[in-house]
Image (cartoon, helix red, strand yellow):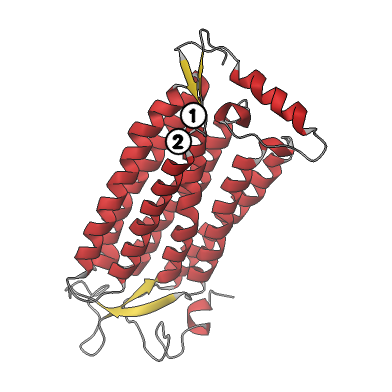
């Protein structure tokens, strides 16, 4: 039995929603790809949750955040595979390529708004994974997440605009992204370096990986929702590969790097139910007294300790 999701959920056809149709949309090939990415995200979620059971509850925060990222993405890709969570928007640029040209009476391109709902939830969690690893102060973490939300929402609004005004939203989103990129690559790296070589290495690998991939998303937007250059099936592959690299692969790199890092070293003081609060406080003091080479160590609350040696 073939993939009948597009026909089952298109009323009217093709790619119908709210009484309208989109002639520039995914085929069964695009739908199959979305189902494949759904499977990757789902399996990754179970793997990350399974790995969390190898750690004490007080050490599972990064496993839970990372599993939440792929879980939300799995739901979003399930929705796109079923050809749901989308609406048709008239394209700004009418192309001669038959895959994106539309017809004389219909030049609507299928826009998956569910993708942006996914990103609105998952990109802040990705940043939380990164910025908590660096031990950044909470005000910086929250402000960076706000800018990330601006980046995603302006991308969504721009995708839903037919006219050239969509590029104004693109500029707003890029400005927010550049601020996020600066925080991750410059500010975050300085904080991570102060916490020890192992933390700095994990943060640098995951941070550079993330920002490199995130620079590719505006390119994808420009040739898909923005410029109507490539087909919806090609759009599915482009975004799907990026999301696999930015979520399951990122998560694997991050959790591998965290395998020997106590969250207390990052200023995350998490108490299990059977632990006495006084014992946890004493343990945290011991971590702050841990000697590291390089002089100072800054925790997530902004407290600074002096050190003379390194333990990695």
Q: Residue at x 51, y 42 (%)?
A: 129
Dot 1 and dot 2 residues touching (CB under 8 Å): yes
Vertical side of 144 occupied by 93: above or below: below
- Asked if 46 appears above or below 51 in the picture, the reply is below
- For the point 52% across and 70% down, the residue is 79
Q: Is residue 290 visible?
A: yes
State the image coordinates of residue 240 (x, y, percent, origin top left). Answer: 43, 56
Kindly identify which numbered label has been placed on residue 202: 1
Relative side of 58 to 177, left or right: right
The image quadrant that residue 261 belongs to is top right
Looking at the image, residue 185 sits to the left or right of residue 115; the answer is left
Give how far across and how far down residue 13 sits, in percent. Answer: 41, 88
Element under disc 2: helix
Decide if residue 240 is on the left or right side of residue 90.
Answer: right
Question: Which residue is nearer to you in this view: 278 or 155?
Answer: 278
For residue 225, which quarter of the picture? bottom left
Residue extending farthest top: 308
Give the left or right position of residue 47, taking residue 116 as reference: right
Q: Is residue 249 visible?
A: no
Q: Position of residue 39 (x, y in %)?
A: 58, 57
Which one is nearer the viewer's eye here, 301 or 194? 301
Q: Is residue 311 above or below residue 238?
A: above
Badge 2 is on which residue? 206
Rounded to the nearest whole Å, what is the CA distance between mark 1 and mark 2? Answer: 6 Å
Characterize the local packing of mark 1: few (<14), some (14-19) or many (20 or more) Cα atoms within 10 angstroms: many
Q: Is residue 132 above or below residue 225?
A: above
Q: Position of residue 66 (x, y in %)?
A: 57, 46
- Quarter that holds the C terminus: top right
């Amino acid at each position: 039995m073939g993939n009948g999701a597009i026909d089952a959920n298109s009323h009217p056809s093709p790619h119908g929603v709210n009484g309208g149709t989109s002639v520039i949309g995914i085929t069964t090939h695009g739908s199959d790809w979305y189902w494949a990415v759904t499977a990757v995200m789902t399996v990754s979620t179970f793997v990350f949750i399974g790995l969390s059971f190898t750690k004490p509850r007080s050490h599972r925060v990064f496993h839970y955040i990372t599993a939440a990222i792929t879980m939300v993405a799995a739901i979003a890709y399930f929705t796109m595979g079923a050809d749901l969570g989308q609406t048709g928007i008239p394209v700004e640029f009418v192309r001669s390529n038959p895959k994106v040209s539309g017809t004389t009476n219909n030049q609507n391109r299928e826009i998956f708004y569910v993708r942006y709902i996914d990103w609105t939830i998952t990109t802040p969690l990705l940043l939380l994974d990164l910025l908590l690893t660096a031990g950044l102060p909470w005000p910086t973490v929250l402000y960076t997440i706000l800018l990330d939300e601006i980046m995603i929402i302006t991308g969504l609004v721009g995708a839903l605009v037919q006219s050239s005004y969509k590029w104004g939203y693109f500029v707003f989103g890029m400005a927010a992204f550049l601020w996020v990129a600066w925080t991750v690559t410059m500010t975050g790296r300085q904080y991570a370096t102060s916490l020890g070589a192992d933390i700095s290495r994990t943060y640098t690998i995951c941070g550079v990986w993330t920002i490199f991939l995130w620079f590719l998303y505006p390119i994808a937007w420009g040739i898909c929702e923005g410029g109507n250059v490539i087909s919806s099936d090609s759009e599915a592959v482009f975004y799907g590969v990026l999301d696999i690299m930015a979520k399951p692969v990122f998560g694997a790199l991050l959790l591998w790097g965290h395998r020997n890092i106590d969250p207390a070293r990052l200023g995350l003081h998490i108490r299990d139910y059977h632990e006495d609060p006084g014992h946890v406080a004493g343990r945290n003091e011991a971590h702050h007294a841990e000697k590291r080479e390089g002089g100072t160590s800054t925790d997530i609350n902004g407290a600074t300790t002096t050190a003379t040696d390194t333990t990695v």
